[in-house]
Amino acid sequence: MSESPCFYAGDRYNFNDSIGHRLFGVMMMFRREADARMARHGLTDAQWKPLWMIQSGRATTANELARESGIDAGAVTRMLDRLEAKGLVERLRSESDRRVVHLKLTEAGQAAAAHIPHVLASVNNDFLRGFSERDFQALRKLLDRMADNGRALQGAEEAA
């Protein structure tokens, strides 16, 4: 790993100039906008995210959903109880391993989830208004580099 740059110094650190703070602020605005647009389709934050993870194949079990969502298994169980009560998700016990419960969207869940990628694409596009294709690709590459640096730091911490 190359030497870390010194873009910031603790003795003159300004929270509002922090890239982390700015990224967090943009993410919070993005989240509020996505939630507002999802609400137009009758979906709350606690509904659309798990529906999308199940629909996209990122989570096929409660354990995967907990890991992907960054929430504990108990909270996922309560969330799934609510989604099941609304007729959006069903739980199917694995025939090969009875300890495993697979998650499947019902027809109503599939219909609700069908709106999600369109809403997210719309929000992304609106946040990227005025960006050229070149700007967009550069931003993606820069964010990928930051993520790579973060993964390297986490890997170094785990190795220590």
Image: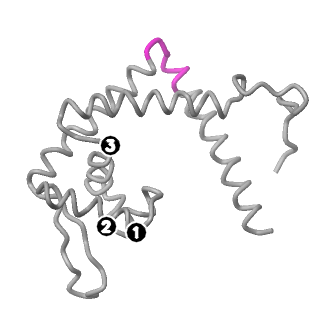
10 is higher (above) or lower (below) than 55? above
Q: In which quarter of the image is residue 154?
A: bottom right
Cα distance between the residues tagged 1 and 2: 6 Å
The quadrant of the picture occupied by the C terminus is bottom right
**In the displayed structure image, the side of residue 109 where residue 38 appears, left or right:** right
Q: How far across and down, in percent of the image, does residue 49 sit? A: 33, 48
Q: Splitting the image into 4 quarters, where does residue 155 fall?
A: bottom right
Tell me the kind of residue under disc 3: Asp
- Three-letter code, disc 2: Thr
Q: Position of residue 55 (x, y in %)?
A: 25, 54
As for residue 120 lying within the magenta part, the answer is no
Which residue lies at the image location 34% right of the left edge and 32% below the top edge?
34
Q: Give the range drawn in magenta.
A: 129-136
Q: Nearer the viewer, residue 54 or 1?
A: 54
**Label at residue 142:** none
- Mark 3 to mark 2 CA distance (whole Å): 16 Å
Farthest residue in the top direction?
A: 130
First along the sequence among labels 3 and 2: 3
Q: Is mark 2 on a helix, strand or loop?
A: helix
Relative to 133, residue 145 above or below? below
Say left or right for 40 vs 31: left
Say whether marks 1 and 2 touch (CB < 8 Å).
Answer: yes
**Does residue 78 appear left or right of residue 25 in this picture?**
left
Tell me the residue that label 1 is attached to.
73
State the SS at label 1.
helix
Instruction: Identify which amino acid the numbered label 1 is placed on.
Output: Ala
- Specify the label residue 45 is tagged with: 3
Most extreme residue toward the right, as rendered? 11
Please rate how many residues cluster around mark 2, counting C-alpha atoms within 10 Å: few if below 14, some from 14 to 19, many from 20: some
Q: Which of marks 1 and 3 is nearer the N terminus?
A: 3
